[in-house]
Image (cartoon, rainbow, N blue to C red):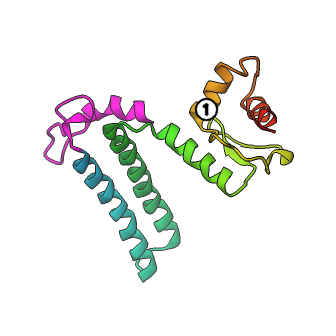
Amino acid sequence: MEEANIVRLPEFKNKKGKLAHTIPDVTDWTIDQWATATGGEWGEFLSFLKQFNRGDITWEEFVKEGGKELADTVIYLSLLAKRIGINMDEVIVDKFNEVSARINSRVYIGNDWEYHLKPKEKLNNTIKRPLTAARIKELKGNLFEHCSTEEEVISRHFDAMS
């Protein structure tokens, strides 16, 4: 999504029909401007939620219109992250996997963005170094270059720590 956002950015026009961005990347807006735009979209979602809670719109209308505003929020979050220099793909995977390790969950997200399950016997091992997306790439590229899947890298990583 990040790349598509950047490619599409120069095409945005304001309500007066003028280009909204003067530079074909995210740097013409400050971090505050991107954060404000993101907050505005979140506010629009909350407005639809309020309308549903008041009985002004049906559940179906809320799901349809609220879903659009949630999508806008995520799109703006992606642009905000890009402006700050955060790779959202990496930080989302890393944070998800960090929480999974903390709560001793078998579920983790691989670099393929699919969820995977760790073998049950590996759950009680203490991970001294978090198994982040970057760490999986590092392990696969170095220590476990002969592994064909992320599951194999993770399994061998846990075996090595036992």
- Say if 7 sits above or below 51 in the image: above
111 or 73, which lies in front? 111
Which residue was labeled with disc 1?
135
In the figure, is residue 73 to the left or right of 95? left
Residue lying at 44% horizontally and 75% vertically, measured from the top left: 52
40 or 57, which lies in front? 40
Check the picture and name the quadrant holding the C terminus: top right
Packing grade of label 1 (10 A; few <14, some 14-19, many >=20) is: some
Q: Hey, which residue is sitting farthest bottom in the picture?
A: 54
- Say if 32 sits above or below 55 in the image: above
Toward which corner of the image does residue 54 lie, by quadrant? bottom left
Kind of residue at badge 1? Arg
Residue lying at 27% horizontally and 35% vertically, measured from the top left: 26
Residue 71, position as x, y percentages in the image = 44, 51
In the figure, is residue 98 to the left or right of 20? right
76 or 111, which lies in front? 111
Toward which corner of the image does residue 84 lie, by quadrant? top left
Residue lying at 52% horizontally and 71% vertically, measured from the top left: 59
Q: Hey, which residue is sitting farthest right in the picture?
A: 121
Q: Secondary structure at mark 1?
A: helix
Residue lying at 64% horizontally and 39% vertically, measured from the top left: 131
Check the picture and name the quadrant holding the N terminus: top left
Residue 62, position as x, y percentages in the image = 47, 67
**Magenta-highlighted residues:** 1-30
In the figure, is residue 45 to the left or right of 113? left
Toward which corner of the image does residue 17 lie, by quadrant? top left
